[in-house]
Image (cartoon, rainbow, N blue to C red):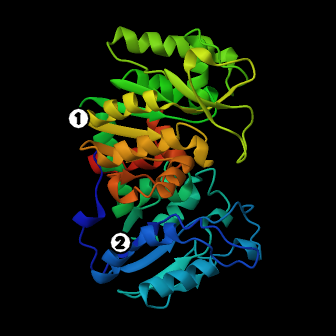
Amino acid sequence: MNVIKLADLDVKGKRVFIRADFNVPQDDAGHITEDTRIRAALPSLKYCLDHGAAVMVTSHLGRPTEGEFKPEDTLTPVAVRLGQLLNKPVRLITDWVDGGFEVAPGEIVLLENCRCNKGEKKNNDELAQKMAKLCDIYVNDAFGTAHRAEATTNGIAKFAPVACAGFLMGAEIDALGRALENPKRPLVAIVGGAKVSTKLTILKTLAERVDQLIVGGGIANTFLLASGKRIGDSLAEPDLVKEAHAIMDMMKERGAEVPLPVDVVVADEVSALARANKIPVDDVELHDRILDIGPKTAARLTDIIAHAGTIVWNGPIGVFELDQFAGGTKMMASAIAHSDAFSIAGGGDTLAAIAKFNIADDVDYISTGGGAFLEFLEGKKLPAIEVLELRAKG
């Protein structure tokens, strides 16, 4: 994926329009409760300010109705927090699409919630052209919205004099490209979660590329069913057994593998008080629920991870939120942390597991993308990146 990078451009004296992702959680009083996304945008903002650019930055927040601005839609709390982090005032500009406001070199203004503009979600060309006239350089630094074709993520990039990727977007593109486009082998993918149906496309795409496809959670239970094992009352999708079988056959034909559990941790309910029993997979009884992999399986998967060249991780292996069913995910997390392979992880539950087992510093790249990360794994073209690639070709 070849795109123009912000770091390669001279921004001095230029009007720079940055699309960031400031969609941060707030409490009932409108106070920001977690500011990771704001902090993630700081490198691009500081680069432009330090190099004498006049900076305009915008984002969506929540799910406003286009053309109907409400008080709860405002980016005012973001302007306040951004000012604190940058140690300089950040003016909030409303009704900004038609211009009429000044920004001096070295100054930053925040443009009010872009999803309040009519035509934003439909990627309206007229709106995109108006926004493009505001700037000399357009910067997309919102990977989390890269899977959506909207006026501030796709349309403006078509019409701005220059369109490039910011530091955060550039890092995502580099990491995903390194993991999936030209990976160091063996390439190991770990896909966990409750349902095969939500990740079927991802599993099929990865089955064509990876050397080992480790499945976990309810997904693994469906694969166990497909291999003829009893799974008791475990979460699974019996109607997708045929699909799971096809994925295993696809891997086998390539000399690759879907390593399934040989032992599991079961209980009769999912609760903090449930008693965890470690048993061979062939001993699962009628009312057992498989809630984690057993130690023999964990040791085998750890060995696979230890010999990997590249690791892509999306989803936990068991019900890791409960300590008695967290062993498999914990061992996998530890193996990834100690591996010499290039590792990339993404997805909400995955990030929660990384935080729980304190391995953030040992994963080479943690994607902030959510939906965009999953769609990339599915092999889909992301509209926000696709337009940057087209602009890089000239």
Q: Residue at x 23, y 72 (%)?
A: 10
Location of the N terminus (image quadrant): top left
Q: Residue at x 55, y 46 (%)?
A: 371
Q: What amino acid type should be assigned to the residue bearing mark 1?
A: Lys
What secondary structure is marked by label 1? Answer: loop
Based on the displayed image, in which of its 4 quarters is residue 165 positioned?
A: bottom left
Whether residue 307 is situated above or below residue 55 in the rendered picture: above
Q: Secondary structure at mark 2?
A: helix
Looking at the rendered structure, the kind of residue marked 2 is Pro
The residue sitting at 43% across, 90% down in the picture is 87
In the picture, measured across the screen, residue 16 lies left or right of residue 224, that is left
Q: Position of residue 334 (x, y in %)?
A: 38, 47
Q: Which circle marks residue 184 in the picture?
A: 1
Q: Are marks 2 and 1 in contact (CB under 8 Å)?
A: no
As drawn, the label of residue 43 is: 2
Residue 53 image label: none
- Residue drawn where x is 43% and y is 42% of the image: 331
Quick one: label 2 or label 1, which is nearer the N terminus?
2
Q: Position of residue 29 (x, y in %)?
A: 75, 79
Kindly tell me whether residue 100 is visible in this rendering. Answer: no
Residue 120 placed where, x, y %? 62, 57
User: Is residue 129 at all visible to an observer of this figure?
Assistant: yes
252 with respect to 288 (left or right): left
Residue 184: where, in percent of width, then height?
23, 35
Badge 2: few (under 14), some or many (20 or more) residues near its Cα, within 10 Å? few
* Label 2 to label 1: alpha-carbon separation: 29 Å
Up the image or down, 114 lies above or below 249; here it is below
Residue 240 quadrant: top right
